């Protein structure tokens, strides 16, 4: 089995080329994740409260079972991942009223900081240029909170 080096944020980086001409055009999930993170100014868990105080919209996309098990993220708006783009796209008829400013900072939070990167990248492609995510997700935030007692 091929070994893959691990990046600073714990994602395996396989040696496979990102050049689509080298294969059928398909990416591995790790390659897609790395590409998605290129344009993100990711937020560290220690900076989340500061982001909120500065007016960022923090969106918790964790499924209900994870929120029930681990708790809520105070101040976050809960939006199911499967409807996220429709609720935040300013041009969508199904957007939430709080999603009326495409220039607003949006911080997506999932459980561990993987699906949130993909979601934030998608939001950027919809014109929400300041969309990003929380490094390590809810688990990093919860661990930091537990440390600080």
Image: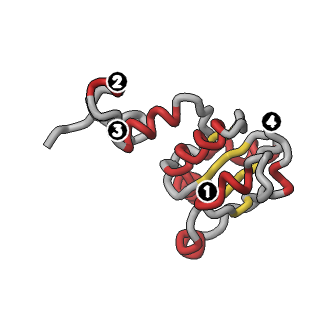
Looking at marks 2 and 4 on the same chain, the residue that comes earlier in the sequence is marked by 2
Q: Which mark is residue 26?
A: 3
* Quarter of image, res 84: bottom right
CB under 8 Å between discs 2 and 4: no
C-alpha span from label 3 to label 4: 32 Å
What residue is drawn where x is 58% and y is 75%? Answer: 68
Q: Which mark is residue 145?
A: 1
Give percent across and percent down for residue 136: 51, 48
Dot 1 or dot 2: first in sequence order is 2
99, above or below 9, in the image? below
Task: Determine the secondary structure under disc 2.
Answer: loop
Closer to the eye: label 1 or 3: 3
Mark 2 to mark 4 CA distance (whole Å) = 32 Å
User: Could you tell me which quadrant the N terminus lies in?
Assistant: top left
Image x and y of residue 88, in percent: 73, 51
Residue named by callout 2: 19
Would you name the residue on which mark 4 appears? 103
Q: Residue at x 29, y 34 (%)?
A: 24
Q: Nearer the viewer, mark 2 or mark 4?
A: 2
Q: Is residue 27 above or below residue 144?
A: above
Left of 16 or right of it: where is 142?
right
Which mark is first along the chain, 1 or 4? 4
């Amino acid at each position: 089995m091929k070994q893959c080096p691990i990046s600073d944020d714990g994602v395996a980086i396989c040696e496979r080329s990102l050049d689509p001409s080298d294969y059928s055009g398909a990416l591995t999930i790790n390659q897609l994740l790395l590409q998605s993170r290129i344009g993100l100014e990711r937020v560290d868990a220690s900076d989340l409260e500061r982001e909120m105080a500065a007016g960022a919209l923090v969106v918790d996309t964790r499924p209900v079972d994870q929120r029930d098990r681990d708790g809520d993220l105070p101040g976050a708006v809960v939006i199911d991942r499967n409807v996220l783009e429709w609720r935040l796209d300013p041009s969508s008829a199904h957007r939430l009223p709080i999603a009326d400013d495409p220039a607003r900072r949006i911080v997506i939070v999932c459980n561990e900081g993987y699906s949130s990167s993909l979601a934030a990248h998608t939001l950027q492609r919809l014109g929400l240029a300041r969309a990003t995510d929380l490094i390590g997700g809810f688990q990093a935030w919860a661990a930091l909170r537990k440390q600080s007692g």
